[in-house]
Amino acid sequence: MSDKGRPEEGGNILMGSCPLPLTNYQEIVLAHGSGGKLSQQLMQKIVLPQFRNELLEPLHDGAVFSIGGARLAFSTDSYVVNPIFFPGGDIGKLAVHGTVNDLAMCGARPLHLSVGFILEEGLPMNDFWRIVQSMREAADAAGVTLVTGDTKVVDRGKADKIFINTSGIGQVREGVSIDPKRARPGDKIIVSGCIAVHGIAIMSVREGLEFETEIASDTAPLNGLVEAIFAIGKDVHVLRDPTRGGLTSALSEIAQSAGVGMLLDEASIPISEEVKGACEILGLDPLYVANEGKLVAIVPSEDAGTILSAIRSHPLGVDAAVIGEVTADHPHFVLMKTRIGGSRVVDMLSGEQLPRIC
Amino acid sequence: MKYLDEYRNETMAQKIVGEIRRIITRPWVLMEVCGGQTHTIVKYGIDHLLPDEVELVHGPGCPVCVTSLEMIDKAHAIAQRPDVIFCSFGDMLRVPGSEFDLLVLKSRGADVRVVYSPLDCLKIAKANPDKKVVFFAIGFETTAPGNAMAVWQAYRQGVKNFSVLVSHVLVPPAMEAILQSPLNRVQGFLGPGHVCTVVGYEEYEPLAERYHVPIVITGFEPMDLLEGVLMTIRQLEAGTAVVENQYPRIVKREGNKVAQELVNKVFEVCDRKWRGIGSIPKSGYRLREEFREHDAERLFDVGAIDTQEPSICISGLVLQGVKKPHDCPAFGRQCTPEHPLGATMVSAEGACAAYYAYGRHLQAEKKPLQPV
């Protein structure tokens, strides 16, 4: 030890001292992919300036544009989940659902998908077969066709078993305009079911963190649920599937993009007892944990009841709830009334959500 | 959630707050010692519920925050070695040392792993006999038994490739340093519930008496904190200064004897440097000589690393409750959890990080936030 002995009496121990700042990461760190602030910074500082255009600008789940009179949605996503098989799903299923859902969140009917596989040398053929079969089942269930693809194999150690990219196009419904900018003061915020399930299911089987639980991923195609919402003919302002970064990162992003505030009621946010328990033990905040089969709908107040009933009558929406509303107050910020009647701001996820020590 | 929802109840909260309002006659400054308590306070907006007369200041009880820069640099020196698997509690990964943090080292190829228990490292050590597995043993008295157990098991089972980098700190010496300071404003303490689960609260009794300050050993749920505040205010209003136990469902006066025996078998008390505060005599644990084979500081020869901490932020003052996070001009601007300037911003349990996570930087900027 190199302790310098007893501090001088009085003032000396009160000298504030702290480390030099890390002004910027010089390498990519994992948190750049967490869906929170670092991801946003990476986009804003490096990617967006190179490609700036009006379709990319909204940074929504997909781009919406017209070709020959047809309004199309186009989206892409890559999947690197570890482990590749997990309770409730696998990387293939996730890859189909993810892009289907991104298209659905644009108000589109997903139609065709592409798939790109990056395979690590040594991946058991049987695993690959299971994944591909699972993708076909997922595509059938979602009513999409896989129409083009590519496969690359890299040296052992240069990838982790299998990475998948899927892109997709869909046709946007007549008269539908889904845009985060359309969130308006007075609108109600609906979440389609219990949050934080996927993230906790994955955590439960991560190496070194295994814990016994019945929690299975909620990965599911949301286009059927979106179909059910539009079937009642009401205007929906915003749809979003809160994946990485969780519910509150998604809501913060919408609040910032629409220049509105939001007020949530903590007690009304549906979270299962099992997930609550796992989050307590792991020191995680469920509001920031990933979902793969849930959507957030921001809808006019007068239609909220009807839309909520429509969501609840769909098998994927039985636990849906109104969790708050859009406000003119505190623009750009999401406030939450806490369970005990206090209040706090809920911000985007900052860095990766790391388990706390005690 | 059974056994937890009862402690997060709005009606009950209003009742306790009402009682605090009824008995309080003048302003009082209380310090909650633990980072976990700070976290609950800002997470649930407890300080906003309390009457204006109660000022809560946040104490030094965030183990990640107070781990010295020097120790972080030692950890980084070890983690960079190709023969090492470096294991740590999760929130230590983002703490900046002089040059980088563990996340950066990981991105450069170091084998850095998050564990929930030091005993998991033993499993990793057995599975990787050609590697040296090092656990960063930080924390207060709370984490000491688990860390001691890992060392004890490694010693007994002869797991030679497992070692610990020990940077344990103790609460009572830090509380005493705060009380001795001429800048001290703290009039009552919400004591560290989980620390006392292990060590009991006998050693807090002389502190309460010597400095005439009430100490209420307090839990971590919203109702615990509110009740802890009520009990402390009751004492202050009555002019008493004794140790009380708000957390009897967990804490006993004598603590956990079995855990204490194990800790004493493996560790001995030493002087310890605290980040943002400086060296405090007899405020830490180090491994006893008998366990030197498991002492990473010796094994990897990092004892000579002696980093001085530059004085550029007020985290030391925040850790001692002299300043609030938003008193710092850098708070929420140059200093954020992505780019922490100070120790208190790096761990989720740090006062600055807790304030940041729950939006206090927005309120500090005086954006047009409306109260709920």
Image (spheres, rainbow, N blue to C red):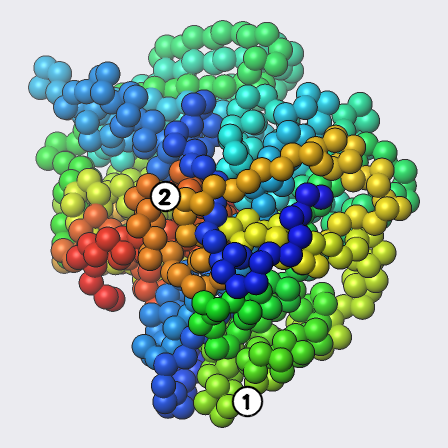
Whether residue A304 sits left or right of residue A126 in the image: it is left
- Residue at 71%, 36% in the rendered image: B303
Q: In the image, what residue type sits under mark 2?
A: Cys
Whether residue B354 sits left or right of residue B214 in the image: it is left
Q: Nearer the viewer, residue B349 or B15?
A: B349
Q: In the image, what residue type sits under mark 1?
A: Thr
Question: Chain under label 1?
Answer: B
Please identify the quadrant where the N terminus of chain A is shown: top right
Question: Chain under label 2?
Answer: B
Per the image, label 2 sits on a secondary structure element best described as loop
Residue B231 position, x and y percent, is: 51, 83
Please identify the quadrant where the C terminus of chain A is shown: bottom right
Which residue is label 1 attached to?
B240
Q: Nearer the viewer, residue B88 or B55?
A: B55
Residue A31 visible (yes or no): yes
Give the mark, 2 or 1, whose residue is nearer the N terminus.
1
How would you rate the neighbour count of disc 1 (Cα within 10 Å): few for under 14, some for 14-19, many for 20 or more? some
Whether residue B18 sits left or right of residue A239 in the image: it is right
Quadrant of residue B198 in the image?
bottom right
Residue B16 position, x and y percent, is: 43, 82
Give the number of the disc on residue B335.
Answer: 2
Residue A292 position, x and y percent, is: 42, 38
Residue B243 position, x and y percent, is: 62, 81
Give the number of the disc on residue B195.
Answer: none
- Residue at 57%, 13% in the rendered image: A158
- Residue at 14%, 55% in the rendered image: A328
- Give the number of marks: 2
Task: Indicate whether B335 appears above or below A48.
Answer: below
Residue A293 visible (yes or no): no
How would you rate the neighbour count of disc 2 (Cα within 10 Å): few for under 14, some for 14-19, many for 20 or more? many
